[in-house]
């Protein structure tokens, strides 16, 4: 064969072989496309069948607990925003708080004793979206424990303010411990939650109170730095509420005027009320 013809033949063979490769590749691509289409439809069908009950369950949960979910999300967001954590018990002594160092626009309200019980009070608390720590002393509430259950439903928490409301500074460890621990156990049985804060009656406390409180499982001895009292605000520092202040008021006949004074002071300072318990 002449050299020219030979070269042409080789070129032809190469060209054929190249065309075959392209054909094989195209075929492969078509087969792959068909396979993936079949697989996709099969999977979609299977998923549809499989997921029917799961979707129903999730929807059911959503319908049942949208508020809880929202609440959890809100609480997580709030937790992230918190810039302070209440210190732990150190050397067996519960920390003493009257305000907390935060830059966030919050105040904390404690309502004490529980002697005076007027049904409109809870409505006022709810209408203003107030969640407070209720420092109740057993001697004031033993005639009607149930009265405070609606406060718990509305988001407030019941804390320890002793059994007999005796001023504690100078009293023996045994006496103080009994006052604090007995109240905690009693409130656990009455309300289903053990208090975590102790407010000493009259703000009277000493290092023994801190020790007894810690031994009774209290996370802090909680005092106050401002008061809503007799229909007006009284401040230990300055003349307005500051972020992190703990405010004291009582279940007294003048509850409405005291609460209004607190709300006015809170709003004037651009603050909102949170639960101190959430800052642990
Ligand atoms: Zn008191």
Image (cartoon, grey):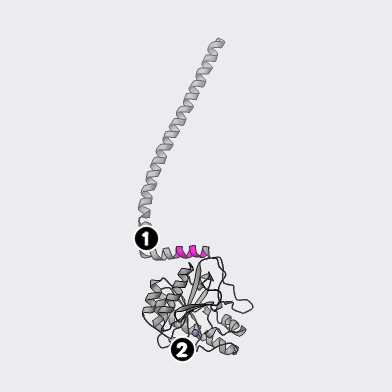
Nearest to N terminus: mark 2 or mark 1: 1
Depth check, mark 2 against mark 1: the one in front is: 2
In the figure, 233 relative to 56: above or below? below
Please tell me whether mark 1 sits on a helix, a strand or a loop: helix
In the figure, 64 relative to 204: above or below? above
User: What range is drawn magenta here?
Assistant: 72-79
Furthest toward the right, the residue is: 91
Asked whether residue 131 is in view, the answer is no
In the figure, 14 relative to 242: above or below? above
| 95 drawn magenta | no
Residue annotated with mark 2: 139
Please tell me whether mark 2 sits on a helix, a strand or a loop: helix
The percent position of residue 269, horizontal first and vertical second, equals 49, 68
Q: Residue at x 38, y 41 (%)?
A: 38
Residue annotated with mark 1: 57
| Mark pair 2, 1: CA separation | 49 Å
Mark sitting on residue 114 = none
| 74 drawn magenta | yes
Quarter holding the C terminus is bottom right
Viewer-nearest residue: 8 or 158:
158
The percent position of residue 187, horizontal first and vertical second, equals 46, 82
């Amino acid at each position: 064969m002449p050299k020219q013809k030979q070269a042409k033949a080789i070129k032809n063979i190469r060209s054929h072989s190249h065309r075959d490769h392209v054909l094989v590749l195209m075929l492969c691509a078509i087969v792959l496309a068909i396979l993936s289409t079949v697989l996709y439809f099969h999977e979609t069908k299977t998923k549809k069948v499989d997921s029917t009950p799961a979707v129903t369950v999730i929807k059911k949960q959503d319908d049942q607990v949208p508020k809880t979910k929202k609440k959890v999300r809100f609480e997580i967001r709030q937790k992230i925003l918190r810039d302070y954590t209440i210190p732990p018990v150190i050397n067996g002594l519960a920390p003493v708080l009257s305000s907390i160092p935060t830059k966030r626009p919050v105040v904390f309200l404690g309502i004490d004793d529980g002697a005076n019980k007027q049904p409109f009070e809870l409505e006022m608390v709810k209408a203003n979206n107030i969640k407070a720590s209720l420092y109740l002393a057993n001697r004031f509430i033993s005639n009607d424990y149930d009265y405070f259950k609606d406060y718990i439903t509305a988001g407030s928490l019941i804390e320890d303010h002793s059994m007999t409301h005796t001023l504690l500074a100078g009293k023996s460890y045994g006496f103080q411990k009994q006052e604090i621990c007995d109240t905690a156990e009693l409130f656990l049985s009455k309300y289903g939650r053990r208090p975590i804060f102790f407010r000493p009656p009259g703000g009277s406390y000493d290092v023994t109170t801190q020790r007894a409180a810690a031994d009774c499982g209290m996370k802090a001895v909680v005092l106050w730095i401002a008061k809503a009292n007799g229909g007006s605000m009284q401040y230990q520092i300055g003349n307005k509420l500051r972020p992190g202040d703990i405010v004291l008021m009582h279940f007294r006949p003048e509850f409405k005027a005291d609460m209004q004074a607190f709300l006015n002071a809170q709003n004037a300072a651009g603050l909102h009320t949170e639960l101190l318990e959430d800052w642990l």
